[in-house]
Amino acid sequence: MSVLVGIADDQELIRALLADVLAREDGLAVAGVAGDGAQAVALARRSHPDVMLMDIRMPHMDGIEATRKIRADPPLSQTRVLMLTTFEDGDLVEEALRAGADGFIGKTQGIDRVIEAIRMVGRGESILSPRATRVVVNRYAHAHSERPVDPRLALLTDREREIVALVGKGFSNDAIAALLSISPATAKTHVNRAMSKLLVHDRSGLVVRAHELGLVEG
């Protein structure tokens, strides 16, 4: 079954190029394109894509507000949002994650990396670009470097702490499974339990939480 992708970007050329490239990829299909956040929300409501590829800086309604609206719409609970943007500064990364984005990748990453990110998000994983990950690390590492041990760590088993730390470093479930000699299903179970205990709704939130809790060194 193909991953249905909606594309939202205010630059017509980028929209057209992405639509053309993705339409040629096995296992991917294009639901439609949008030129601003309001159109992106309308596209999502009309087509129910599996993944909404969302630019941040767009007229009328930006990608972050569009993500909030998609997240707040119950019929779109299965639509995941992947931010694709030139801008990867700290405030935007954090705001996008808090809005409910499932991934964050820079346009400088290249089309192959974008396609890989779409596939990952489409199968239920989350992803942060290397630069976005560094932003999260730098933002939280200093803020938490001199704090006492966070009491929320007591909610996690030793294995869950280990896995949350690996998620925070950007490892996928398959990579965690290989590293710890467990099955991908077991890795996914630990990840889901940790998300529930730490009150986050997706993998990107767990990355942020791993840094908040000091499980990942800056």
Image: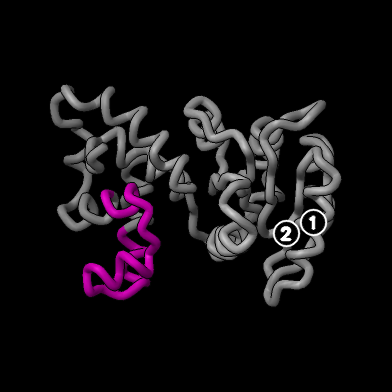
Report x, y in % for residue 63: 69, 35
Q: Quadrant of residue 40?
A: top right
Picture coordinates of residue 125, whole percent (x, y): 49, 59
Residue 26: quadrant of the picture: bottom right
For the record, the magenta segment spans 165-190
Give the residue type at disc 1. Answer: Leu
Q: Nearer the viewer, residue 65 or 153?
A: 65
Using the image, tell me which numbered label, if any, was put on residue 17.
1
Mark 2 neighbour class, 10 Å CA radius: few under 14, some 14 to 19, many 20 or more: many
Q: Give the main secondary structure, helix, strand or loop, of the magenta stretch.
A: helix
Q: Residue at x 81, y 41 (%)?
A: 11
Q: From the viewer's perspective, is the residue at label 2 or at label 1 nearer? A: 1
Tell whether 47 sits left or right of 167. Answer: right
Binning the other alpha carbons within 10 Å of mark 1 as few (below 14), some (14 to 19) or many (20 upward) gives few
On screen, residue 164 versus residue 88, left or right, reads: left
Q: Residue type at mark 2?
A: Val
Mark 2 lies on residue: 5
Q: Position of residue 144 (x, y in %)?
A: 24, 26
Q: Secondary structure at mark 2?
A: strand
Residue 168 place in picture, x, y as percent:
33, 47
**Marked residue nearer the N-terminal end (2 or 1):** 2
